[in-house]
Every structure is written in C-alpha cells, then in structure tokens.
C-alpha cells in the first residue's frame, strides 16, 4: 500500500489497471509511429486521452518525489551512450544518496550493475515499449527506499525519439551523446535535445579516434536550446564525473 497516494501495489486491480494503461498507451504510441498521417478525430481523441492520463500520473509521481524531498532526473540517450556506466561512477563520487529506476526492453543487467555498487535499483522491463511511461515509473517508486534518498534517477530506455515525448514525473532531463555517435545526433533529434536541462558529451577520452567536434556539438545543442548546460565526461576521468555530481548537487540546493 502506498501511504502517500493510497494506491495499493499489491492490489490485483491496480496491477491490472497499470497494465491496461501501459498497453493501451503502447498501442496508441505505435499507431502514431506507424501512421503519422492519422488525423481522424477519433484516433486523436484516444491518443490525447492516453497522454492526459500519463501526464496526470506523472504529476502524481512528481508530488511523490517532492514529498520525500527527492530531486528526480530522467536520463535519456541512444543505447550505449554510457548511462549505466555514468551512474556506476557517480556512486563513487556523489555527495548525495541516490537510487535508480531502470528501464530496459528485456534484461535486468543494468539494475544488477547498479546494485553491485551498493545503490538501490529497480528494473522495469518494458517488453516492446520503446520508452518508460509514468505508470511504469510509479510502480518503480514503490520499490525505492524514498526516505533514504536525495536523488532518484530514471534511466530511460535507450532511444533518442520516444522518451522525449513522455513525462514520467521527473524534475530534470539529462541527455547523453557519446563521441562515437557523432555530434550530428544533436541536430537529428532536436525534440530530445530541446527537452534537455543538461547535455552530457560522454566518452571524450575517445576524441582522438573519432571525427567529433565538441565545439560544434555545443553550438548545435545551444541552437536548439539556448543556454543549455553542457558538460564533457569521461568515466576514466574522475574529475569530469565529479563535475556532473556537482551540477546535480547545485540543482538540489536550488530547490
């Protein structure tokens, strides 16, 4: 039983409800993906109802985090940009306590890696869903020791398209782009980068091996979102990871 919202996670109906929402949501999402020309009123109405429900649940998640004094951060990127690796390294330097709600299509690997660092983590397997939604994250909230945390990361499904459109109830969005991916990813996925409060350029130790311009990446990010914070990170350089931790700590204190 969730004492804040009265919803009961063990309650069969709630499970069922959650499942209904997420599968209806997924169906609508696929409809949108595969038929971008769909503009009949009925489809649009169904889709906006599902998005409204999602946003309502996201607001509920956010007030949950607020009640516990937790700063919630949505981590988004392509697969393999280094989200989990960054969290593992943050565990060594962070001046705050954090937990992680992990989204992945199939495996528990990411959560296992985080738990191995002594960090509370809960894996959500999304199955065919290409992003986390607010209902999935709500379920993960109940598995987190919220009273003991200062920060909760939601590590979204690796994907630079879908997660950008779904509020999951976090306060901040951090978007990673790695050197091997190329700086053109930023211009190719403007919706994602427009949502970013912080852009992390990761794997910068690989700069000598790739044609990647940090300057052009920063310009591209700031063209899409003027004034966005950009940090360069290599998990081989502890100071660069510490700068990410400091940015988060600053955001915590501002709240």
Image (cartoon, rainbow, N blue to C red):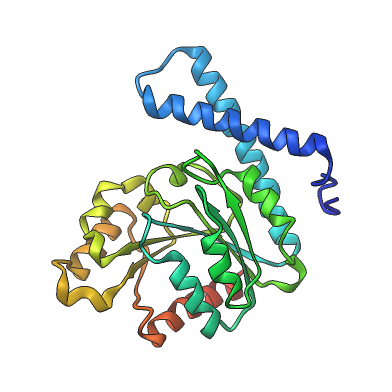
Task: From the viewer's perspective, tell me whether residue 8 is left or right of residue 112.
Answer: right
Please give the name of the residue rendered at 45% of the width and 76% of the height, measured from the top-left corner: 244
Q: Position of residue 205 (x, y in %)?
A: 26, 79
The relative height of residue 109 versus residue 239 in the rendered view (above or below) is: above
Task: From the viewer's perspective, tell me whether residue 62 is left or right of residue 157.
Answer: right
Please give the name of the residue rendered at 36% of the width and 45% of the height, measured from the top-left corner: 191
Task: From the viewer's perspective, tell me whether residue 91 is left or right of residue 214.
Answer: right
Q: Position of residue 69 (x, y in %)?
A: 71, 67
Please give the name of the residue rendered at 74% of the width and 55% of the height, measured from the top-left corner: 142
Q: How many marks?
A: 0
Write down the quadrant of residue 126 in the picture: top right
Please give the name of the residue rendered at 55% of the width and 19% of the height, measured from the top-left corner: 45
Indicate the quadrant containing the C terminus: top left, top right, bottom left or bottom right: bottom right
The relative height of residue 82 versus residue 54 in the rendered view (above or below) is: below
Task: Point out the residue furthest to the left here.
Answer: 211
The relative height of residue 254 versus residue 77 in the rendered view (above or below) is: below
Task: From the viewer's perspective, tell me whether residue 118 is left or right of residue 75.
Answer: right
Q: Position of residue 87 (x, y in %)?
A: 50, 71
The residue nearer to you, when weighing 92 against 149, is 92
The residue nearer to you, when weighing 230 against 203, is 203
Q: Position of residue 2 (x, y in %)?
A: 83, 52
């Amino acid at each position: 039983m969730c004492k804040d919202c009265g919803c009961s996670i063990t309650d069969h109906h709630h499970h069922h409800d959650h499942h209904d929402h997420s599968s209806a949501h997924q169906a609508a999402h696929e409809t949108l993906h595969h038929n971008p020309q769909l503009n009949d009123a009925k489809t649009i109405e169904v889709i906006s109802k599902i998005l409204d429900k999602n946003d309502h649940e996201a607001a509920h998640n956010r007030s949950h985090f607020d009640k516990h004094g937790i700063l919630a951060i949505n981590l988004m990127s392509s697969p393999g940009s280094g989200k989990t690796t960054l969290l593992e390294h943050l565990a060594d330097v962070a001046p705050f306590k954090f937990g992680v709600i992990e989204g992945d299509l199939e495996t528990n690997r990411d959560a296992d890696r985080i738990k191995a660092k002594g960090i509370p983590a809960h894996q959500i397997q999304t199955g065919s869903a290409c992003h986390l939604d607010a209902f999935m994250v709500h379920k993960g909230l109940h598995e987190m020791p919220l009273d003991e945390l200062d920060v909760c990361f939601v590590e979204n499904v690796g994907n630079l398209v879908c997660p950008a459109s779904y509020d999951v109830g976090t306060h901040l969005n951090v978007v990673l782009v790695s050197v091997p991916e190329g700086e053109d990813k930023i211009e190719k996925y403007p919706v994602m980068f427009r949502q970013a409060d912080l852009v992390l350029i990761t794997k910068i130790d690989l700069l000598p091996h790739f044609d990647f311009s940090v300057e052009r990446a920063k310009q591209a990010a700031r063209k899409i979102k003027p004034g966005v914070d950009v940090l360069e990170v290599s998990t081989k350089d502890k100071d660069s990871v510490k700068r990410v931790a400091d940015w988060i700590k600053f955001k915590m204190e501002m709240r």
